[in-house]
Amino acid sequence: MSSELIVLARELGPAAPEILDLTDPAHLGQAQRAADRFLAVSTNTNELRLLEAALLEERDAHPLLIQLAAKLAVSRSVVLNLAQPAHVSIVFAVYQEHQRILTREQHPGGEDFLVRKVEQLDWLVAGCPDITWDMFVVDDGCPDGSGQLAEEIAARRGLGERVQVLYLAEAITEGMPVTAPLTDPSQSRKGGSIALGLWKATRNLHPGHVAVFTDADLSTHLGQVGLLLEGVLERGYDAAIGSRREPASVVIKQGARNNRGKLFIYLWKRVISILPDVVDTQCGFKGFRAETVHEVVQELLEKKFAFDIELLIKTRLHREDSIVRVPVAWIDSDVLSTTTDLQPYLPMLKAMVQMYRVYLPQNASADLFAEFIVELDDAGWERLLENIPAAITDREPADFGDFAGVSAADLRAAAE
């Protein structure tokens, strides 16, 4: 690694904010400018990865913004060095995003996320005429007009054909097969809309076509899309999935939500055996080879929040060595979250039991956990959250593939 890179990182650090505010466009813009400074020193991906590793070794000494900037620099270097044309389709669902889509001046929690996602993609591919992108915003039956707001903003900003707004309700009415068996958008919780968006985005294939789905908020900077392109186009995987639980991940998310996430991962690991190497199924940043996802996204069982894991199961059934994990920088956007209050973990686990029974060979151990999950009600889930065994909370989820020291009977007792 060039010593100039680490010296530059140390010089940039003092000017970085202590906390990244996703409602402040200056913050993520500052991260992009810092990435540009790194790239001015070197566009060699390996050198920039060495910088990233050095920052991670001393992560407490470097602000989050600088660590994010290093990942952005690596991502853009991948794009600058791609040996083939590429096309990226970005898909995300909107439901009750009518406030977060606004600017901070219009609403205190506004992230102006549509405009800023476009800016992030434009930054990533600047100067690369062989790398193109389009975006599919899918209204998940929003009662507050999130889709209409997205259309208005896209028209006002002159985003043209690069940004399309789709409506799940219209697709259901038209009888699009990818929406089956939905009869109303209220039966979807994100999954139905993501499936529609991925299907629509990959109907017309482009050279080097990668379809990426993400969250509506700005938790994952789209300047990191190059990291997914590398996994699919350079390394030959069918899916490159962002992960917040890798040693090289940069994440702001702590406390009860983290322990709840650990319990969730421990439970699904006991039932879904085909993904032993996957830890973070729910990170909203996944890229798929377009041909593959167009096939696997059809006839999904799950149209709600557990759709991610079904896509991964079907991708791995499609081809065994088909998924690679990608450490990402991720910043919790919790102020206007539309899922925090829903706490969908138990319904997701129940949906995974159905996937287990449809897609995977049955075994006695998985059956015990599947039965426990099916029998668990909301009250029992809340009691379990208050009494998560220390053997789960004290371990990292990466260990849960091998560690099965907490039995279904132990968890049943904790939930009583």
Image (cartoon, helix red, strand yellow):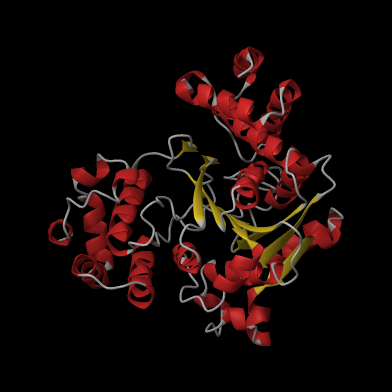
Could you tell me which residue is drawn at 64 percent across and 47 percent down? Answer: 234
Of 357 and 320, which appears nearest the observer?
320
Could you tell me which residue is drawn at 21 percent across and 52 percent down? Answer: 404
Locate residue 403, reporting x and y percent: 23, 48
The quarter in which the C terminus is drawn is bottom left
Q: Quadrant of residue 32?
A: top right
The quarter in which the N terminus is drawn is top right
Q: Is residue 158 above or below residue 330?
A: below
Whether residue 304 sits left or right of residue 211 in the image: it is: left
Q: Is residue 361 above or below residue 276?
A: below
Whether residue 396 sits left or right of residue 375 in the image: it is: right
Q: Is residue 200 above or below residue 411?
A: below
Of 248 and 158, which appears nearest the observer?
248
Locate residue 231, reporting x and y percent: 59, 48
Of 369 and 273, which appears nearest the observer?
273
Could you tell me which residue is drawn at 58 percent across and 29 percent down? Answer: 49
Q: Is residue 142 visible?
A: no
Locate residue 387, reporting x and y percent: 20, 50
Whether residue 209 sits left or right of residue 132 in the image: it is: left
Could you tell me which residue is drawn at 60 percent across and 34 percent down? Answer: 71
Whether residue 368 sits left or right of residue 188 in the image: it is: left
Q: Quadrant of residue 33?
A: top right
Exactly how many numbered labels are in the figure? 0
Q: Is residue 390 visible?
A: yes
